[in-house]
Image (cartoon, rainbow, N blue to C red):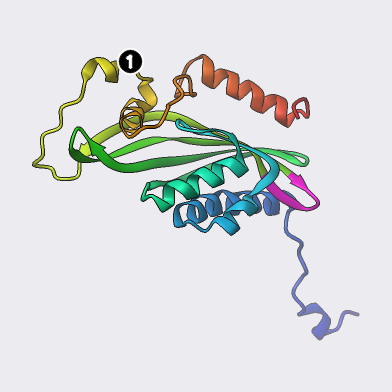
């Protein structure tokens, strides 16, 4: 006969390990944005695996170099900020692909007018769990659409329409601003549709299947 004391004990339940992995990945993605934008470089380094690779409009290379140039820019007053939305995570054993809705915002002078540019897209992350810890192996943003606005709504902004039209549709205003202030912008980053984003999706499938290093 079961005692009253025994029957009143709450059942012990273990959390789904897949859910724990998803929570850890989401936490990592959120920490990336908060620590990078706050200039918390010591903790920012912990979200990457050693060979981590970062791609952006203005930089493509090892994560350690991305941290270095980001620190240099931060010290000079460059502010490229991020805001995150929902995340979709595909898990396959110790590997994952995470897609996170985001916006990138930057403020700078454009033809002597102080402007804000906002670009909407997704972070597409290749992640791996090593010794119980998830980390980013590769981050590739997908640039979907953007816009530019004067900080002072009464200001008049005139862009070089020919130069603007020559830039990729998904991030042309962001690229326009960044090239004006001295960055060299990569012209074939993935957008909402097209060969570049389809190639990225294929690389993601290979990563999950264990075919890519």
**Secondary structure of residue under mark 1:** loop
Q: Quadrant of the N terminus?
A: bottom right
Q: Quadrant of residue 164?
A: top left
Q: Where is residue 108 in the image (x, y as percent from the top left)?
A: 28, 41
Q: In which quarter of the image is the C terminus?
A: top right
Q: Where is residue 160 in the image (x, y as percent from the top left)?
A: 21, 21
The answer to whether residue 130 is magenta is yes
Give the residue displayed 47% in from the left and 48% down from the top: 72
Q: Is the magenta stretch mostly helix, strand or loop?
A: strand
For this orientation, the residue located farthest to the left is 154
Residue highlighted by disc 1: 166
23 displayed left or right of 30? right
Q: Position of residue 91 (x, y in %)?
A: 70, 39
Which is more toward the observer, 94 or 177?
Answer: 177
Would residue 126 be visible to someone looking at this image?
no
Give the residue displayed 25% in from the left and 34% down from the top: 148
Give the residue displayed 78% in from the left and 29% down from the top: 210
Q: In this view, does 95 lie above or below 164?
A: below
Label 1: few (<14), some (14–19) or many (≥20) C-alpha neighbours in 10 Å: few
State the extent of the magenta-drawn residues as a range. 129-135
The answer to whether residue 95 is magenta is no
Which is more toward the observer, 46 or 119?
Answer: 46
Give the residue displayed 62% in from the left and 52% down from the top: 45
Q: Where is residue 82 in the image (x, y as percent from the top left)?
A: 42, 46
């Amino acid at each position: 006969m079961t005692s009253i004391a025994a029957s009143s004990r709450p059942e012990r339940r273990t959390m789904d390990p897949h859910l724990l992995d998803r929570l850890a990945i989401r936490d990592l993605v959120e920490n990336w944005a908060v620590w990078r934008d706050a200039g918390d470089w010591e903790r920012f380094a912990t979200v990457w695996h050693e060979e981590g690779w970062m791609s952006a409009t203005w930089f493509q290379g090892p994560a350690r170099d991305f941290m270095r140039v980001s620190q240099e820019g931060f010290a000079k007053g460059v502010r490229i900020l991020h805001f995150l939305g929902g995340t979709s995570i595909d898990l396959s054993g110790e590997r994952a692909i995470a897609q996170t809705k985001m916006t990138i915002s930057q403020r700078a002078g454009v033809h002597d007018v102080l402007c804000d540019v906002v670009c909407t897209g997704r972070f597409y992350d290749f992640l791996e769990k090593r010794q119980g810890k998830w980390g980013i192996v590769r981050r590739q943003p997908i640039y979907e659409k953007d816009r530019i606005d004067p900080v002072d709504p009464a200001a008049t902004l005139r862009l070089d329409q020919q130069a603007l039209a020559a830039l990729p549709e998904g991030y042309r205003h962001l690229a326009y601003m960044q090239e004006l202030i001295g960055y060299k912008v990569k012209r074939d980053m993935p957008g909402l549709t097209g060969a570049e984003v389809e190639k990225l999706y294929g690389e993601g499938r290979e990563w999950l299947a264990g075919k890519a290093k």
